[in-house]
């Protein structure tokens, strides 16, 4: 039976060494909680590092104990941990992805080599346990190369990838020397998930600027495989956190907390030690509160829990010292005989103690400088079973996109954070309940079970989409069927677009001239007396005439404005107005002035704005603006607006490839009609041809064509096969 293989850097258990033995303790992390039920059912397994170096003589014992829990270990050496985890993962990826590249990043080539080798180790363990039909779900920034490594060996496997930290803007991401390799690694997945749409947008921006792939909306064409990129905001086990405050243990601890703090209002903050969490800024805001509003002295307490993390690393040890010093200064300055401003714990707390704090704290302050989701905010909301309490949430946390009824703040603005604390402390109960009720409903609906289900269903849909594309692709079986039909017919007409179909995309439109191979191929096809070969293009008639004027090929230029029968002169459609050009030309000129690298091409009955040399992103932005500007003007003047590959064209409505092709088809009793084209203008061609015509789009995406090929190379391969076949 097919299974799901979950893969993450760490397994969802902690290993404790006791009396020369190892003890397995469940982890309380968000990922471990979220996927805790998934890997324990239907033969599913979880692969990851056990969390510490295991002595070689003990690996067999640990492997056996883990396997009983459906867990499979990847063993790492101390060098692996230092170079791969502490080095590349946390000295390159973590600071860059959290916008601290200039402060904490070190680009050490040896870190990169270990990052690659550890991803290979994970790949080896996965492949040992991977069977036909299995699904692999890979998690987080430590394993960005893993999807492609698996794909190289098992091209058919279904792979999902989810990033649990923010993805940075292109300007930040491109600082990484190995940026392309990281993106290519991620694109080995079929579905790539992020917490927010901002992360999706940043990822697509980086891919479009750094890799030679085609992107349409949130779908990436990576070679011959489509990759879908979407946001899936992660939830929590809401039932668990809503139920804990009802247990006797948590109730008792909550009573103790309330007894200790008596009439004080508690402002709770819970974080892992990290420079991205905004802990120092939080302390500054609290200090500002006490300084500017002394009436709160003795009435509020900041209950701050900082969970130790990598404090052996110099930058983290320095941060811990700064926090210790700041807490000490505030407490020394404002403490009274019976009140301490900040209750500070530098350790992890049991979940029962956290639940007691969640259920008693009047305010929860979550102000990371940058965070993927931040599940603490959702845990607090789920724990407020009386629908009271106030959440203050950083706009830099992914959760702020969902929990819009929180008091959302800019964590860099300590005055705003201070003001939000005051608003939270003074908020009427009715307003608290209105906000908290909305947030609790959302946290309950979009819980972790919903997150898992949504991702896995979407991954299944993506695989179905890929398979449907494979059935439409002109692969060996389909090509053979077309060739057999070609051989069995005696009067054929073949329509061929030029740019993007017979030749690849060129940055300079004048560089896309035919090569010797193309001339030989077209000569071979046109030499067959049973064939009528038609090149039907948006190109100027002068271009096509220079290249093919002396060939046995019927030429249709400028989308059907000009015609040239073999060995005869050009003639054009008459009676069409061009007076509209002067009005639109001035508009086009404005966009040339505003878009370096763009230019205007004038044809007999059309104007074309090219932006293939413009900066990526800017050209697309200006093209959309131009389309919106021209939309109503073109309709009023009876013109057609054509978005193309790095072009925007306006032409007379009466001219299109479909009309031109249909006039030729109707002149002869053809028993074989085939058309190949790559862009929007070719859809008119596909639409106009008879139902029995073989229509083929070059490239993927929505099309009226019955089949598709990936690129001009495959077009030439198919045409070569036709030319070499012997007619019946």
Image: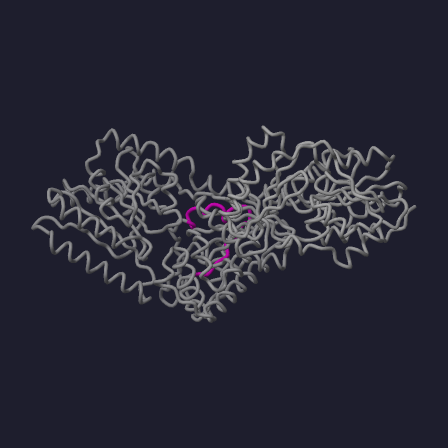
The residue drawn where x is 47% and y is 43% is 232
Q: Residue furthest right?
A: 728
| Residue 383 highlighted magenta (yes or no) | no
Up/down of 700 relative to 661, above or below:
below
Residue 120 horizontal/vertical position (percent): 54, 64
Which is nearer the eye, 273 or 287? 287
Up/down of 449 relative to 83, above or below:
above
Residue 111 horizontal/vertical position (percent): 45, 68
Q: Is residue 187 left or right of residue 563?
A: left
Residue 471 can be seen in this image: no
Looking at the image, how many numbered discs can be counted on the residues? 0
Residue 14 horizontal/vertical position (percent): 39, 58
| Residue 41 highlighted magenta (yes or no) | yes
Task: Describe the colour scheme in one phrase.
Answer: one colour
Q: Is residue 419 left or right of residue 83?
A: left
Q: Is residue 430 left or right of residue 585?
A: left
Up/down of 374 relative to 318, above or below:
above
Q: Residue furthest left?
A: 337
Which is nearer the eye, 604 or 465? 604
Residue 418 can be seen in this image: yes
Residue 167 horizontal/vertical position (percent): 44, 52
The magenta segment: 31-50
């Amino acid at each position: 039976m097919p299974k799901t293989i979950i893969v993450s850097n760490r397994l969802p258990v902690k290993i404790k060494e006791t009396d020369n033995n190892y003890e397995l303790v469940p982890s309380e992390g968000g990922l471990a909680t979220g996927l805790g039920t998934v890997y324990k059912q239907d033969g599913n397994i979880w692969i990851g590092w056990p969390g510490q170096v295991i002595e070689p003589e003990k690996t067999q014992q640990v492997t056996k104990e883990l396997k009983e829990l459906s867990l499979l270990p990847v063993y790492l050496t101390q060098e692996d941990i230092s170079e791969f985890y502490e080095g590349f993962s946390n000295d390159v990826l973590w600071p860059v992805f959290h916008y601290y590249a200039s402060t904490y990043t070190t680009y050490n080539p040896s870190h990169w080599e270990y990052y690659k080798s550890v991803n290979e180790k994970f790949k080896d363990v996965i492949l040992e346990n991977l069977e036909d039909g299995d699904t692999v779900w890979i998690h987080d920034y430590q394993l960005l190369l893993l999807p492609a490594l698996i794909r190289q060996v098992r091209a058919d496997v279904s792979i999902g990838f989810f990033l649990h930290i923010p993805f940075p803007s292109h300007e930040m991401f491109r600082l990484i020397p190995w940026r392309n390799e990281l993106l290519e690694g991620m694109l080995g997945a079929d579905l790539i998930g992020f917490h927010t749409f901002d992360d999706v947008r940043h990822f697509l921006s980086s891919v479009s600027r750094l890799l030679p792939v085609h992107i349409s909306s949130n779908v990436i064409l990576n070679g011959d495989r489509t990759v879908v990129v979407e946001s899936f905001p992660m939830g929590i086990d809401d039932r668990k956190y809503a139920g804990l405050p009802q247990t006797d243990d948590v109730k008792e601890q909550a009573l103790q907390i309330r007894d200790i703090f008596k009439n004080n209002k508690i402002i709770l903050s819970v974080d892992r030690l990290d420079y991205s969490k905004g802990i120092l800024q939080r302390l500054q805001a609290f200090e500002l509160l006490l300084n500017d509003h002394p009436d709160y002295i003795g009435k509020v307490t900041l209950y701050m829990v900082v969970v130790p993390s990598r404090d052996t690393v110099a930058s983290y040890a320095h941060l811990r010292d700064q926090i210790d010093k700041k807490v000490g200064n505030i407490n020394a300055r404002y403490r009274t005989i019976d009140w301490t401003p900040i209750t500070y714990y530098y350790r992890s707390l049991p979940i029962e103690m956290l639940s007691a704090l969640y259920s008693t704290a009047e305010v929860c302050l979550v102000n990371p400088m940058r965070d993927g989701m931040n599940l603490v905010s959702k845990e607090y909301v789920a724990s407020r079973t009386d629908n009271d309490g106030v959440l203050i949430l950083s706009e830099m946390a992914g959760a702020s996109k969902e929990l819009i009824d929180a008091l959302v703040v800019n964590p860099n603005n300590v005055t705003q954070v201070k003001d939000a604390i005051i608003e939270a402390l003074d908020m009427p109960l009715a307003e608290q309940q209105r906000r908290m009720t909305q947030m609790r409903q959302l946290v309950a609906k979009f819980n972790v079970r919903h997150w898992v289900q949504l991702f896995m269903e979407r991954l299944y849909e993506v695989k179905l989409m890929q398979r449907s594309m494979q059935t439409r692709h002109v692969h060996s079986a389909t090509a053979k069927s077309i060739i057999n039909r070609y051989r069995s017919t005696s009067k054929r007409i073949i329509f061929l677009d030029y740019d993007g179909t017979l030749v690849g995309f060129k940055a300079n439109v004048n560089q896309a001239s035919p090569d010797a191979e193309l001339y030989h191929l077209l000569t071979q096809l046109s030499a067959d007396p049973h064939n009528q070969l038609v090149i039907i293009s948006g190109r100027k008639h002068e271009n096509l005439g220079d290249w093919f004027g002396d060939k046995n090929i019927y030429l249709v230029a400028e989308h059907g404005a000009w015609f040239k029968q073999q060995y005869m002169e050009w003639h054009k459609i008459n009676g069409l107005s061009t007076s509209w050009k002067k009005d639109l030309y001035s508009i086009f000129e404005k966009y040339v002035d505003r878009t370096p690298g763009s230019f205007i091409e004038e044809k007999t009955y059309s104007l074309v704005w090219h932006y293939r040399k413009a900066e990526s992103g800017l050209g697309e932005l200006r093209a959309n603006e131009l389309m919106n500007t021209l939309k109503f003007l073109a309709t009023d003047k009876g013109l057609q607006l054509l978005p193309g590959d790095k072009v925007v064209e306006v032409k007379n409505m009466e001219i299109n490839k479909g009309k031109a092709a249909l006039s030729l088809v109707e002149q002869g009793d053809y028993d074989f009609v085939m058309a190949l084209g790559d862009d929007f203008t070719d859809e008119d061609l596909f639409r106009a041809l008879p139902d029995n015509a073989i229509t083929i789009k070059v490239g993927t995406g929505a099309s009226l064509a019955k089949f598709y090929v990936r690129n001009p190379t495959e077009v030439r391969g198919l045409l070569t096969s036709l030319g070499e076949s012997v007619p019946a």
